[in-house]
Image (cartoon, rainbow, N blue to C red):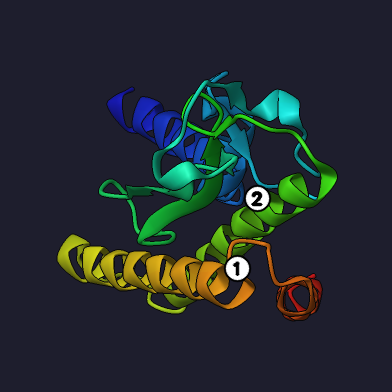
Amino acid sequence: MFHKNFIYISYFIFIINALIIPLNDSFIQKYFYSSLNYFSYSNETITWDNFTKTDSLKDGFAACIESDIFYRINKVYNYTPATVIAQMDKKESKYILQTDNLLQHEYYHFKITEIVTNRLSKKLSKNHFINTEKAQLFIDYYYDTLRLMQKQYDFETNHNRNSEKQKEWEAKIDLELDSEI
């Protein structure tokens, strides 16, 4: 009797794993874990409704998006060492002034976050069965990469004041995102 129950339980566990494991954690997190305060990157553009109105911002900016790489290191199984997703914090993304150009500039900050998140995801997916410390090193490296790329974007576009550079960055960003589809 014990042997028969053990076989049924093993079979049940196998079926559950077969159903769950193919669902990438980022899929689960993106569609079921996101709270109302966060907006996950998708092909949909952001709107001013994804931002919070404020009276002032640091450094005299008219808007500021707070987007980042959200992650969870997988400790139970190593299907992928970590789940990563690009999200914006709607509560911390703020604006004083609303213009189409300004929204476009902020949206490209979000797209940069998605690019770096995709790079990190690819790196992690090529490194199955690494320990949590090594996964954290990858994540830290790509966090630094994200910060540098965001600063370079703002510097070269002069925070959207240099329209020629803005268009160059938009083309470069769109090209990389389109190549990942």
- Nearest the viewer among 56 and 28 is 56
- Nearest the viewer among 181 and 12 is 181
The Cα atoms of the two marked residues, 2 and 1, are separated by 15 Å
> What secondary structure is found at the residue carrying circle 1?
helix
Reply above or below: 151 against 46: below
Can residue 20 be seen by looking at this rendering? no
Residue assigned mark 2: 106
Residue 60: x percent and y percent? 48, 43
- Nearest the viewer among 99 and 87 is 99
Question: Which residue is painted at 52% across and 21% down in the image?
Answer: 55
> Quadrant of the image for the N terminus?
top left
Q: Is residue 168 left or right of residue 156?
A: right
> Quadrant of the image for the C terminus?
bottom right
Q: Is residue 113 left or right of residue 176?
A: left
Question: Which residue is painted at 35% across and 32% down in the image?
Answer: 6
Residue found at the very far left of the displayed protein = 133
Question: Which residue is painted at 40% across and 40% down in the image?
Answer: 58
Quarter of the image where one finds residue 134: bottom left
Marks 2 and 1, the one that precedes in the sequence:
2
Residue assigned mark 1: 115
